[in-house]
Amino acid sequence: MAARERMKLTDAAVARLRPREREYTVWDNRVAGLGVRVRPSGGRSWVLLLDAGGRTKRVSLGPVGARSLEEVRREYHARRAAPEPARKTRLPRPVPLFRDFVAGPWKEAHFDGYRASTKKNIGYQLSGQLLPVFGAKPLDRIGEAAIRRWFERCSRTAPGNANHHLACLRQVLNFAVACGHIETNPAAGIALNRRPKLTRFLSREELARLHAALDRHAREGRSQQADIIRLLLLTGCRRGEIMGLRWTEVHDDMLALADSKTGPRTVPLGSGARAILDRQPRRGSDFVFPSPLDASRPRGRDLSLWHRVRREAGIEDCRLHDLRHTMASHAVMNGVPVPVVSRLLGHSSVRMTLRYAHLADRDIEAAAERVGDAMAKAMSGAGT
């Protein structure tokens, strides 16, 4: 460390100090701890070094022109005579349990601001996975190894859901870092499961097999679940939008959804979708598909029939959400413009819909083949 620059400070000597490329301080060689700081801009200010509870504290007394050297010396001696009391040692704050942090600070800062549908999804993730596994642990006792074991266990049966659970956990722990309860997020370095990039959609033959399987189950008394699956396919709606559909949202030619993923939106109804809605019994419930156990509530997320019919139809690699992809894909292949499909799906951006555009390539290739054959025949004089 460079030696301190000292000189006999007088008003005249301070006035002669000139700026340099870097800020510097000149200390009085008679009064230890009294100095003048000179900035590259030419500004000069008085500084003091004082004892503050066993540590040295640097205090600025403002620009040189505001006080004379004599006034500064008196201030220095007055402060030395009455030093600041030593700071009391603060006891470390107890680190909250994960469940208490989620129910308190995180809920107030994040959860309470979510839309109703988002609250429902996050609630499932918390009650179904995060709280049972991590709820009783202090935040600073949740380590990466434990998170990784839990994530790998979840990923064996539902890799997509495991990704959603991990994303929720990361968000909670990021807020714990911001609140000062932990230094780093132990979930930050865990990679999400890779998901298939290609969009799965059902062919005409697969759709026929699916409808045949749904018809069989409808005749056996599982008509509500069968109608939900058909309505998902015919409208392109998300599962939560249909499962929680209210009669007040059903109109003659459209659904007026009050709370979709991208906010309120309307969904046009074709004749097939309209027929499904018309045959739903009105049992005094607000919901089109009420719970079989409690008509005042919508049917839960359970749609067990889907696992059975996809096995019977030979489409076991198809997810329920792929019915939405199927509707969009067939719309594109039948010439519906991508912006229109985007409106039908309720996408917030057309870019989200462009992933379906390539599915029309087979039609373009078939058309090019037909045009090529016709041109070849014309050039060879065939048919004349």
Image (spheres, rainbow, N blue to C red):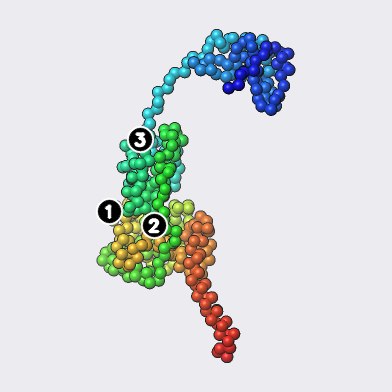
The residue that label 1 is drawn on is: 293
Query: Judging from the image, what secondary structure is the residue with disc 1 in?
Result: loop
Alpha-carbon distance for marks 2 and 1?
20 Å
Query: Judging from the image, what secondary structure is the residue with disc 3 in?
Result: helix
Dot 2 or dot 3: first in sequence order is: 3
The residue that label 2 is drawn on is: 239
- Left or right: residue 57 versus residue 293 is right
- Left or right: residue 199 versus residue 63 is left
The front one of 167 and 150 is 150
Q: Residue furthest front?
A: 2
Compared to residue 376, the image places residue 204 above or below, namely above
Where is residue 369? Give x, y as percent. 52, 77
Q: Residue at x 58, y 16 (%)?
A: 49
Q: Residue at x 53, y 15 (%)?
A: 51
The residue that label 3 is drawn on is: 141
Q: Quadrant of residue 235?
A: bottom left
- The kind of residue tagged 2 is Arg
